[in-house]
Every structure is written in C-alpha cells, then in structure tokens.
Image (tube, rainbow, N blue to C red):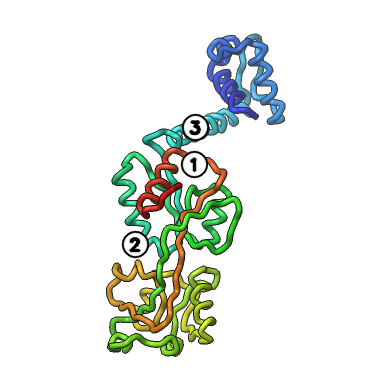
Amino acid sequence: MEMSQLQNFIVTAEEGSMTKAADILLLSQPALSRSISSLESELGVPLFDRKNRKMVLNRHGKAFLTDAKALMQRWEHSKLQMKEMIHPTLGNISTAFVHSLGIAYVPEILKAFQLENPGYTLTLQEAKAGSIIKDLLTNEVDFGFATQFRIFPELEYTPLFKDNLVLIVSAHHPFTESQEKISIHQVAQEPLIHYNPDTELKKLIDAAFAARNETINIAYEGLEVNSIIGMVRANLGVAFIAESIVPTISGIRAIPIHDFKIERPIYLIHKKQGFLSNAALDFKEFVLRHHDINRT
C-alpha cells in the first residue's frame, strides 16, 4: 500500500465520482481506477458500490475511510516533523543519559544550549548505559551521555570529562569528625548503599575494592542514585557518587580516602553513519565547544 493510494481513495470517496476525483488528483480515470482496484485487492474487500458513473462507499469503505484519514493525518504530521528536524533553526534533539548525570551535569548543559538555541526542542530520557547503547543502535535517540562500557564499531565515542567518584556519608556520621583522610579498609567496614548490579558504577566500585583486596560490606543494593543519596542522608550507610553531584546535595559530606581513586569517564555517543539533523549537529558542536574539545 502506498500513501498515494490512500489519498486517491479519500478523494474519490468524498467526491463520489471517479471523474471529479481524477480531475482533482490530476490523474487519468484509468490510472485512478487501477489505484483504487489495487487498494481493494490488497485489503481483500471492495470499498465502493459502483452505480453507473457514481462511486458509493459500501460498509467496508465507510469503515476504512476513517482509518485512511487517520493514517494520512499521521503521515502529514510525520513529514512535518522531518522538515523540522532538518530545518536550520527548528528541530528536535533526542538525548539519553545515565541517571547520575541528570542531577547536575545534564540540566546545566541543556540550559546553556537552549539559551543559545531557543528554536530547538529536546526529548530526554534517563536510562542505564546498556539501554542507552541499544537506543542509539536502533536510532531511538540521537545522542547518549554515558560511560563506554563496551565498544561498538557502529558508534562514535567522544570523551568529554572524567568524573571522580567520592565517598559520601551523612552529616552526622563519625567520619565527618576525622581531621585526616580515612583508609579504604575503614570504608570496607561500613555498610555500603550500592547501585543496581548491571550498572557501570557498581562494576567500577567493585573492581576498585577488589584491586585493594577489600570486601564490600553491602547493606542495600539495586538502587538508583537519588535513592542512594536519600539513604545516606538518613545515615543508613555510606556510598560512592559522582563528585559533580555533591555540591547540589544538602545533609551529606564527601570524605577523602587515602590513596584511593575511582574515575568514571563520560562520553558523548552517537551513530557513526546515522543521519544527524542540523539541530543535532548544532547540539554536538555546542557540547564539544562547552568542553573545549577541538574537532580536528
């Protein structure tokens, strides 16, 4: 079925005459007749009762006319969306990001981008790194802000910055009274509020403890960053979060650890060969400029 067949059917149904419809559609009557017949053949039912020179909708045709108009309306809407996507000053950018970046980094960079580009709209979604990669590979989103947990040759990864993971505790935790850096062994004795098992943050933290031959004392796991912060604030345990988040949160303290560092690289990710609208290209250029990254 072609969209032109739907259009031909709708006009013929509304005019009730093959001659009038052919004139409006700038088609010969035989061409219009073939188009209608082809549509009926594909649907498996006749849509018209042909009486002399008139085309009268039967019950199948009346039912299908409603659907045909809805399909045409959706098609026109989709074409308009495509035009907006490639328009030099209008368009939508779809972006996905890992949960922890949604607290400070993503809101700040999106606000700055929209101040500079008020004509563009943004579609946002939070997800785990694996889900973001899937959506990039299937063209569900234009860009992803995430860690590079696995290399896919179809994707382009641009490193933006390294976000240190720091230990946070409640403002009432005994660690806040220490005048010196604590040891990783001391941290290992504390109940840890941990991330979902399939997140890259959990894998990074687990690997860092394993490298120091320390066993993590997990109190709770399977949580996202906002829940983790809430539980730490309630003094139910300690946790590691991105350092960039700490200044935005009250009721917690970041505690330095002696000779222990965990870094999480953050990348801007998109398809290498996928279509990027002018809006999306402007967004990428803005992000790179924001991080003083030279494209050459």
CA gap between label 1 and label 3 equals: 16 Å
Q: Amino acid at mark 3?
A: Lys
| Residue 51 badge | none
Q: Which sits in the foreground, 21 or 66?
A: 21
- Residue type at mark 1? Leu
State the residue position of label 2: 104
Whether tag 1 and tag 3 are in contact, CB under 8 A, the answer is no
User: Left or right: 157 with respect to 106?
Assistant: right
User: In the rendered image of this protein, does residue 76 appear above or below residue 163?
Assistant: above
Residue in view at x 36 percent, y 75 percent = 230
Contact between labelled residues 1 and 2, with CB atoms less than 8 Å apart: no
**Residue at disc 1, secondary structure:** loop
| Position of residue 118 measured from the top left corner of the image (x, y, whole percent) | 31, 42
Is tag 2's residue or tag 1's residue first in the polypeptide sequence?
2
- Up the image or down, 57 lies above or below 183; here it is above
- Name the residue tied to disc 1: 276
For the point 32% across and 81% down, the residue is 170
Q: Amino acid at mark 2?
A: Ala
